[in-house]
Amino acid sequence: MLLLEGKSVSKALRAKVKEEIAALSSAVKRVPGLAVILVGEDPASQVYVRNKEKACEEVGITSYSYRLPHDIGQENLIKLIRELNADDRVDGILLQLPLPEGLNTQACLQAIDPRKDVDGLHPENQGRLALGLKALRPCTPAGTLFLLDYYKYDLEGKNCVVLGRSHLVGRPLAMMLNDKTMNATVTMCHSKTRNLKEICRQADFIFLAIGRPRFLTPDMVKEDAVIIDIGINRTEDGLCGDADFKALEGKVAAMTPVPGGIGLMTISQLLENTMQAWKYAMGLIRLEDLA
């Protein structure tokens, strides 16, 4: 079985971003800027934010951190977002999710300027994605496709099953796979899907983003399938994915590990998106030229 590890792939993407920023920043007289907003004290979110800030420094992106109390209030949070929309130093705005209870996540995401929406979650960017138009794309799905391209997988005509329908991963990933640049045949499944085992057994590629530890088992796959595990679950035994890795290890053709797989790609794609937003803001590329 081929292990599709994300460390070398993530490193390659970061090297690309660093090289482009170094080559272009002298001409436009500034480097990209990313504003990171963290509301509350969620421990996992704090770790994610620190990792993102460290990654920005690594590639030459200036990060601006805004750590806010959990009781900041909807009005004050949206006021900050609008100020960052107008700040010429800031090319990307990252609102760390989940937000504390009492805050309207969708309203906050919609307040972000779509041109600075480096998470690709604004309705305008998701709508452009649905229409097959260029836009800033959600980081995890885009990073997933970068990994597949790195390992030289051609998905044209392949039967792909996406397990999960969230607007963060499942839905945008299904749209990207079905786009004319990928030309995959996509079935999007979820917890209410009937005959799920039979559907998965026909898949050449299975993309897991369902949030259930070790959900995918050997009786659900064919022997030459490729498993892309996007799930990250915290269990008593530590982190694990949505696939039963040990049970599947000897049966499938290739699989991503958890941790060490797609999770590494998400932050690297955030850096890529921030660079793309910066290039667009600086007039170096058109909207149609977004990667």
Image (spheres, grey):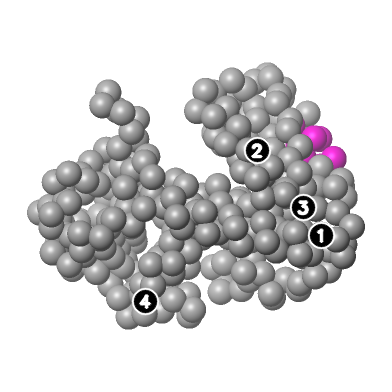
Task: Decide if residue 166 is on the left or right side of residue 160.
Answer: right
Instruction: Give the structural element (helix, strand or loop) at label 1.
Output: helix
Is label 4 or label 2 in front? Answer: 2
Dot 2 corresponds to which residue?
53
Q: Nearer the viewer, residue 180 or 31?
A: 31
Q: Quadrant of the C terminus?
A: bottom right
Amino acid type, callout 4: Asp
Looking at the rendered structure, the kind of residue marked 2 is Glu
> Answer yes or no: do the residues labelled 3 and 1 have beta carbons within 8 Å?
no
- Looking at the image, residue 174 sits to the left or right of residue 105; the answer is left
Residue 206 higher or lower than 40, as above or below: below
Judge from the rendering whether residue 71 lies leftward or rightward of residue 146; answer left or right.
right
- Say whether disc 4 or disc 1 marks the residue closer to the N-terminus: 1
**Which residue is rendered at x = 87% and y = 65% of the image?**
27
Of labels 3 and 1, earlier in sequence is 1
**Up-down: is 115 above or below 157?**
above
User: Disc 1 marks which residue?
Assistant: 25
Distance of label 3 from label 1 (alpha carbons): 8 Å
Under mark 1, the amino acid is Ser
Residue 32 numbered tag: 3
Q: Is residue 91 left or right of residue 246?
A: right
Task: Give the structural element (helix, strand or loop) at label 2.
Answer: helix
Residue 175 appears at what percent x and percent y?
46, 67
Please state the extent of the stretch shown in magenta in the rendering. Answer: 77-83
Which residue appears farthest toward the left when viewing the image? 219
Crowding at dot 4, Cα within 10 Å, few <14 / some 14-19 / many 20+, comes out as few
Question: Which residue has dot 4 on it?
Answer: 154
Q: CA distance from mark 4 to mark 2?
A: 33 Å
